[in-house]
Structures are given as structure tokens and as C-alpha cells.
Amino acid sequence: MTAPLLSLYRRFSRWPAGNWLFSRAVCFKAPYFASISPLITVLEPGRCEGVIRQRRRISNHIGTVHAIAMCNLAELVGGVMVDASLPADMRWIPKGMEVKYQAKALGVLTAVASPEIPIVSAAAGYDLPVLVRVTDSKGVEVFQARIAMWVSPKKA
């Protein structure tokens, strides 16, 4: 069975501006993500891609994309990927995130999230590490995050 979020994405992505509408819907459900004006461009089981573009409101004092804006993007694509990939009987929550700032983040940034182990249904909760890589328009990796997701059965 397809996850409800993935079904919604597939329905919206067929329309003109469908990815934009889907991204706005996600931000409506989780309003803090709207602060970076993200665009989800790819969503499939085990993979989510999202884009932000540098603007003044997410820039820091040295003129690059602020570290916390990239953390926000990483948590967004990681969470959307997990939500769209989980079996219907499971739920998730982020437990922590380790980040690496690798280069100056300028311009359009693309984040790609993928699980480091298979996502499965289980009788007990388990740790799911999710890797998020953020690259600039030249393909240079500027940021990396490893998000610790806690996946557990839904309560009856």
C-alpha cells in the first residue's frame, strides 16, 4: 500500500505547479518549514529531493545560506522521505542530527535524502539513520546531515 503522503505527491505532481502546491501543503502542516520556502522536486520510496534558493532572509552575515536554513531543509527532506516510505503500521520522529558544513553555500541548493538501512515494518522500534546531502548549482557538496529517526509501530 502506498503511503498517503506519497499518493498526495503523485496526484499533485501531475498538475502544472503541482510540486509547488505539494510543498505549500507540507509547509501548511508543518509551518516552520515555510521559513525557507522549499520546493520538493522528487519524492519516491527511499528518496526525497528538495530545493531552496538563497534569499536575504535565509542568509547570514557573510552572505551565504545560513547553517540553520540548511538544517531545516535537511530535516524537511529527511522527514518527507521517511513519511512517504514507511509501511502504514509505522510512525517516525527525529531524535537528533549531526551536520557538516563543507563549503560556502550560495545560490540554489538541492538536498537529497535517503535511508542508510532498509525501511521495514517491525514489531519493535528501531533507529533509522537518514543521510542528507546538500549541493550547490555546480554540484559541490556544501552540507551533509545524518538524521537519527526513531521508527516505531503505531499505537493501536
Image: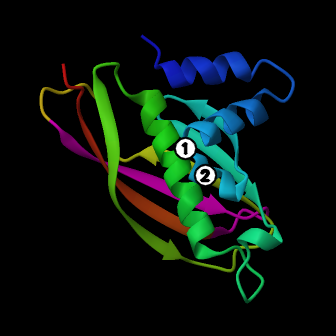
Secondary structure beneath label 2: helix
Residue type highlighted by circle 1: Ala
Q: Tell me residue 153's x, y (percent).
A: 21, 28
Q: Where is residue 89 shown, x and y percent of the image?
A: 28, 20
Q: The N terminus is located in which quarter?
A: top left
Is 101 situated above or below 136?
below
Which numbered circle lies on residue 33?
A: 2
Residue at the left extreme, as displayed: 124
Residue 64 sits above or below residue 73 on the image: below
Dominant secondary structure of the residues highlighted in magenta in the image: strand
Residues marked 1 and 2 touching at CB (< 8 Å)? yes
Which residue of the protein is positioned furthest toward the right in this rendering? Answer: 16
- Amino acid bearing label 2: Phe
Identify the residue shown where x is 77% and y is 36%. Answer: 20
Q: Is residue 5 left or right of residue 61?
A: left
**Residue found at x 57% / y 40%:** 48
Q: Which residues are magenta?
A: 125-141
The residue singled out by tag 1 in the image is 30
Residue shown at the point (56%, 59%) measured from the top left: 72
Query: Left or right of 79: which side holds 34?
Result: right
